[in-house]
Every structure is written in C-alpha cells, then in structure tokens.
Image (tube, grey):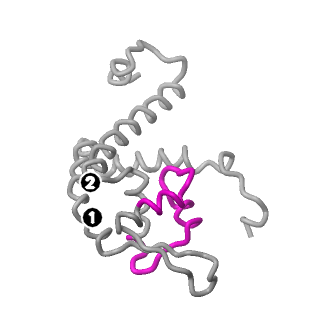
Amino acid sequence: MTKALSRRLKQPRFSSAQQEALLSVVVAAGTINDLMDVVCERHGLTRSQYNVLRILRGVYPEGHPRCEIAQRMVERAPDVTRLVDRLQAQGLVRRSRGSNDQRQAITRITAKGLKLLESIHPEVEANGISLLGKLSDTECHELSRLSSLIFDNPELHPTTDAQQQ
C-alpha cells in the first residue's frame, strides 16, 4: 500500500490491490489533468481543444475529418463539431471540403494554431518533467506498458466484424 495514496484520500486501507491501483491511476490522472487545465486556460484553450490542435499538428499540412479527430482524441469529446467551431472562431483551425468527398469537411491547423502550440510546449514539457522527473526512462516505459494493459483491453472496446476486416 502506498502511503501517498492513503494520505491523499485519507483512507488507511483499501479493499483490494486492484482498488488501490485503480484509485492510484485515477488520482494521478486527475493531477495531470488539473495541471494541463491551468496551462491550457492560460492560453485560452480547454484540454480538448489543445488535444485537437496536437492531433492536427501531427498531420500538418494535411488535416482530418471530424470522425478521425474524434477517434484520435485522448479523452472522448461529446461534440467535436462544436469544439472545432470554437477553434475556427479563434482562427486556430480552418475547414474545407475534401477533394474525394465533397460532403466531408477536412479540418487543418492554421499558422496561428501552430504558433500557439509552440508557445504552450515549454509549459507542457516543464509539467511533464515536474511530474515524471523522478522516474527513470525504464520506469516511464514500464508505466506506459502497465497503463496500456488497462486501456488496450478488447473487452472494453468490442469491434464489429466489419471493423476487423
């Protein structure tokens, strides 16, 4: 049992190792999200908007349709269209009709969006170092491996036969 989690939750013991591990992950994620909220808010964004900009930067100068953005998001957003609308209103992304399918709008990050991400990057990196700087590279890889055992669970994300083909 970790003393830090017991102190944080003011709970001397947990019903199982699984409950303790689950609570540890939830508390750690909350800590990371809280820090990211502060950074994003300072730059006039939400975490979801920041995530969309990062997704689009990853394919710059190309873009993605709304459904592809939604699938790539770290945290699922209920209304990606409105999220993109707000980014477009700020001049951080632009939408255009796709060349293959004129019904599908493609969203691309703008130069202003790239510049904003560049200005946010040092703060995000500093937070990462602050949070994970106590861990060695090996421990970071192990944390990633253990985390993937949780989120890469086929039972949680059943696929249809069409998706598997």
Question: Element under label 2?
Answer: loop
Quadrant for residue 133, please give it: top left
- Cα–Cα gap, marks 2 and 1: 8 Å
Residue at the far front in the pictured view: 89
Question: Element under label 1?
Answer: helix
Residue at the far right in the pictured view: 161
Residue segment shown in magenta? 57-86
Please provide percent x and percent y for residue 20: 48, 25
Residue topped by disc 2: 43
For label 2, count other residues whose C-alpha is less than 10 Å away and answer few (under 14), some (14-19) or many (20+): some
Please give left or right for residue 155 compared with residue 74 in the image: right
**Count of numbered tags:** 2
Residue at the far top in the pictured view: 12
Residue topped by disc 1: 116
Please provide percent x and percent y for residue 126: 21, 50
Up-down relation of residue 45 to residue 162 (above or below): above
Please provide percent x and percent y for residue 14: 49, 17
Q: Is residue 45 magenta?
A: no
Please give left or right for residue 161 compared with residue 1 in the image: right
Q: Residue at x 47, y 57 (%)?
A: 83
Residue at the far bottom in the pictured view: 99
| Quadrant in the picture for the C terminus | bottom right
Up-down relation of residue 61 to residue 82 (above or below): below
| Most foreground residue, 128 or 46 | 46
Q: Amino acid at mark 1?
A: Leu
Up-down relation of residue 142 to residue 104 (above or below): above
| Quadrant in the picture for the N terminus | top left
CB contact under 8 Å: marks 2 and 1: yes
